Image (cartoon, coloured by chain):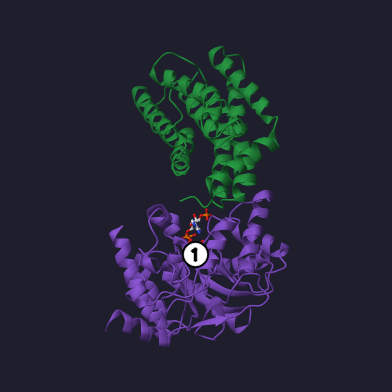
Chain colours: A purple, B green
Amino acid sequence: MSRRAALGSMGAAAAAVLLDPRPALAAPGPVLEKAIPATGELLPAIGMGSWITFNVGDDTDLREARVEVLRTFFAQGGAVIDSSPMYGSSEEVIGYCLARLENAQTLFSATKVWTPLQWHGVLQMESSQTLWGTERLDLLQIHNLLNWEGHLETLLDWKAQGRVRYIGVTTSHGRRHGDLEKIMAAQPIDFVQFTYNVLDREAEQRLLPLAAERGLAVIINRPFQRGALFDRFADRPLPAWAGECGCANWAQIFLKFIVSHPAVTCAIPATSRVDHMLENMGAARGRLPDADMRAGLIRYIETL
Amino acid sequence: MLPFTKDVFFRLLARYNADIWPAHIAAVVLGIVVVFLIFKPRRGSDKFIAAVLAGAWIWTGAVYHMMYLTTINWAAWASGALFVCQGGLIAWTGAGRGRIAFRAGSDRPNWFGVSLVALALLAYPLAGPLTELGWSRAPVAGIASGPTTLLTLGLILLAEGRIPVRLLLIPALWTIVAGASAWPLHLPHALILPAAGIVSFSLALIGNRRLPSNAKRE
Ligand SMILES: NC(=O)c1ccc[n+]([C@@H]2O[C@H](COP(=O)([O-])OP(=O)(O)OC[C@H]3O[C@@H](n4cnc5c(N)ncnc54)[C@H](OP(=O)(O)O)[C@@H]3O)[C@@H](O)[C@H]2O)c1
């Protein structure tokens, strides 16, 4: 099967890219959205991560700076924010920001449970809810598969009680892909989160096709390889299709590469800066690269 | 990998230093008194030095680690607890039971011990402005983990008779942890601390092997 045909068939099975005008938002143009396969609910294809970038403790100046980052995120049509109790004060800082924003109605809260102990997981999830200050968390994920059997039991129970809308599992380590695959194949989860970017493309082999086949929403972490992609490529010319797809910078190239994969629901780049947030959210607008452009990008960066 | 950026960490250090000012003056004065007493011991001076050292570990663990560092790193609860434990150990062995006599001598471990004391009390804080830390974040022995650890390694190496190696365990371990943490921040402490920890521990073991197991301390 050719790459184009493979992508096409996955596209049919997975979330469709839809264009949804959001009149309430200040940003120009419609936001690229993709559907959560389990329910059809639409999510903007670009979300936000919070590892390191939102861990500013109780430093008021830095907290206020993060309020502006989030204000920009929502103004540009963002919704999905990903965090974890592992990320120091990030959840607390997100809650601080949300309480100060008037434009956060579109929030899709995604956090994690990260502890070897099932009973402690319950306390952690309750604490997350308090820290975010939201009535109900949208997505709870088992961080790095830690005690996934135990936490999955709790999560299924919480979902049945309506305490959380979606449940999922995450990893960022290639060596856990085998375990993740088994969970994806057999367990009743809605979301899965793993790493995928122009350089780390292992997920194309099995995880992405499996997610499409099983109807799982896919969140992509480390879309910039923790920023290393900029160190490598930032001073190189953009690929030929940049203009055609409305990409003005490498951040948008990297993100559009990811979200143009038919099985991907959204990418969650992390940033501490308003200008970077604007760049990143710019990837949620305009045309997405097609299969030929994607293949061309890989060939191009391999020459750099 | 650290869960925070250098900027966030440096701002936290500056805020901690500003909040606890003028505790620095008290720490520096106590440091000078300790140096005086290791060269000119008095009655009760060994218990006094141990009490100062124990206080430094307990303060650094309870205030710096648990009240400040935990706001950006949950692992600081564990490091804070380790610091408080070390403070308790020194208080019990040195201040309570009077089992350590701190003496500046001229043999090899003592020479190294005195150098570490000087590094902790003088070079470390004065290097603040020479590195990116600047004055506002200059680490002072007694209230910052790095120089407190070096001061402790130095003073324990000055112990008369067999060196109480169990009192070196947490400081030596901390030099490795702190060195690994300073590495991604590109600070010179990344090398100084582990080197000091490894050499001190080795010198203590070598020194103790030369002495009979029941060698008197005072
Ligand atoms: N197992 C898991 O569950 C797991 C594992 C890893 C990650 N995650 C999630 O995925 C999120 C994303 O991954 P990540 O944070 O590791 O890495 P990432 O998003 O690939 O990269 C973040 C880095 O890119 C920089 N950056 C962002 N936008 C930029 C732009 N437009 N131009 C230049 N630099 C830019 C940021 O610096 P600035 O602050 O300067 O913009 C930051 O240093 C995490 O925050 C976390 O929420 C989950």
Q: Nearer the viewer, residue B81 or B215?
A: B81
Number of numbered callouts drawn? 1
Quarter of the image where one finds residue B202: top left
| Farthest left residue in view | A1
Quarter of the image where one finds residue B55: top right
Q: Is residue B185 above or below residue B146?
A: below
Is any atom of residue B162 visible in this view? yes
Q: Quadrant of the N terminus of chain A?
A: bottom left
Amino acid type at circle 1 is Pro
Q: Position of residue B35 (x, y in %)?
A: 56, 18
Q: Is residue A41 above or below residue A143?
A: below
Q: Nearer the viewer, residue A101 or A5?
A: A5
Q: Quadrant of the C terminus of chain A?
A: bottom left
Give the labeled residue for mark 1.
A116
Classify residue A97 as left or right of residue B75.
right
What residue appears at the point 34 percent right and 22 percent down from the top-left corner? B210
Q: Position of residue A240 (x, y in %)?
A: 37, 66
Q: Position of residue A15 (x, y in %)?
A: 47, 83
Classify residue B195 as left or right of residue B141.
left
Q: Residues within 10 Å of mark 1 (few under 14, many from 20)?
A: some
Q: Nearer the viewer, residue A175 or A9?
A: A9
**Within 8 Å of ligand 1, the CB of disc 1?**
no
What residue appears at the point 59 percent right and 24 percent down from the top-left corner? B49
Q: Nearer the viewer, residue B24 or B186?
A: B186
Is any atom of residue A178 visible in this view? no
What residue appears at the point 59 percent right and 40 percent down from the top-left corner? B84
Local SS, label 1: loop
Q: Chain of mark 1?
A: A
Q: Position of residue A279 (x, y in %)?
A: 53, 62
